[in-house]
Amino acid sequence: VPEGHTLHRLATLHTELFAGDVVAVSSPQGRFSDGAALVSGRRFERAHSYGKHLFHEYSGGTVVHVHLGLYGVFTSAAGTAPQPVGALRMRIEGPRGYADLRGATVCEVLTPEQCDAVVSRLGPDPLRSPNGASRSFARVARSRAPVAALLMDQGVAAGVGNVFRAEVLYRAGLDPFRPGRDVDGPTWTALWADLRRLMRAAVRSGRIVTTRPGDRASPGDTPRAAATHYVYRRAGLPCRRCGETVRTEVLVGRNLFWCPGCQPRRRR
DNA sequence: GCTAAATGTTGAT
DNA sequence: TCAACCTTTAGCT
């Protein structure tokens, strides 16, 4: 269940597992049979990611583009692959190990030019663009949409998902409903820097932890929310800092979480 | 053991 | 606005 850090990790993992090797690619489920036939038997050059998109580059300039969507999952292990079980969209088998893809929204063969087109639709990725704040702010500053909606727009910040959106807004003390055009430059720059910090930490650890050590004890936490988040999936629970009840509301089709105490509406 | 919801996006209506 | 994708897991029983 991935945000940008997950794809970043997968790219590193797949490069380590397959780079330089001739691999066999198959689609036991059948939905990627044609694409698999195009790359099977080629040399796997390298994997890279941008935002929530993953790219596998093969010899000859062919690229496999993967987007995991909401519940796509990529697993891998060293050694020989076992018999396929269930709906296995793509399997890559190399001399050192194998990787299995299930449930992805996108798994397709593209030319490098088509890959460039995919990336060009995306905004800066906080994991890859240290100076992305100004480019993303240009979009934010001329939008009437709530900042919480803009953060989910991959053309504004690629790789940010529902957890990072809720948590970074909380850490900034920013009202999620404030229109983008009412967010000032320094506020956005600081938010971008925090996004980079949170996402890089998630690449390192493999999970999203946004709380600071002093804020991690709170009654009523479910194991799911396990003191790793301030507001994400904590609706109805007391805020770790101010004790106000964390709220939730659907915004742009996703559940938004925020603390009305720490992220107040601005007085006018 | 079962159900519902989930860190996302696309394409049809 | 909504279905599709068709896996995983929390939270029940």
Image (cartoon, coloured by chain):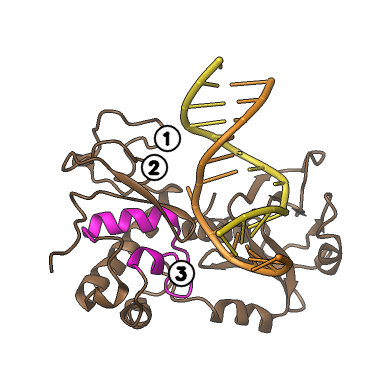
Chain colours: A brown, B orange, C yellow
Q: Amino acid at mark 3?
A: Asp
Describe the element under mark 2 as helix, strand or loop.
loop
- Residue contact at pointers 1 and 2, CB within 8 angstroms: yes
Q: Amino acid at mark 2?
A: Arg
* Viewer-nearest of discs 1 and 2: 2
Chain that bears disc 2: A
> Which residue does the image show at 63% across and 49% down from the upper left?
A73
Q: Is residue A97 something one can see in this rendering?
A: no
Q: Amino acid at mark 1?
A: Arg
Chain that bears disc 3: A
Q: Is residue A39 something one can see in this rendering?
A: yes
Describe the element under mark 3 as helix, strand or loop.
loop
What number is the disc on residue A233?
2
Q: How far from the left and from the top, in percent, is residue A249?
A: 38, 51
Task: Give the residue at mark 1.
Answer: A224
Q: Along the polypeptide, which appears first: circle 1 or circle 2?
A: 1
Describe the element under mark 1 as helix, strand or loop.
loop
Task: Give the residue at mark 3.
Answer: A153
Nearest the eye: A82 or B8: B8
- The stretch of residues the image draws in magenta is A146-174
Q: How far from the left and from the top, in percent, is residue A55?
A: 63, 68
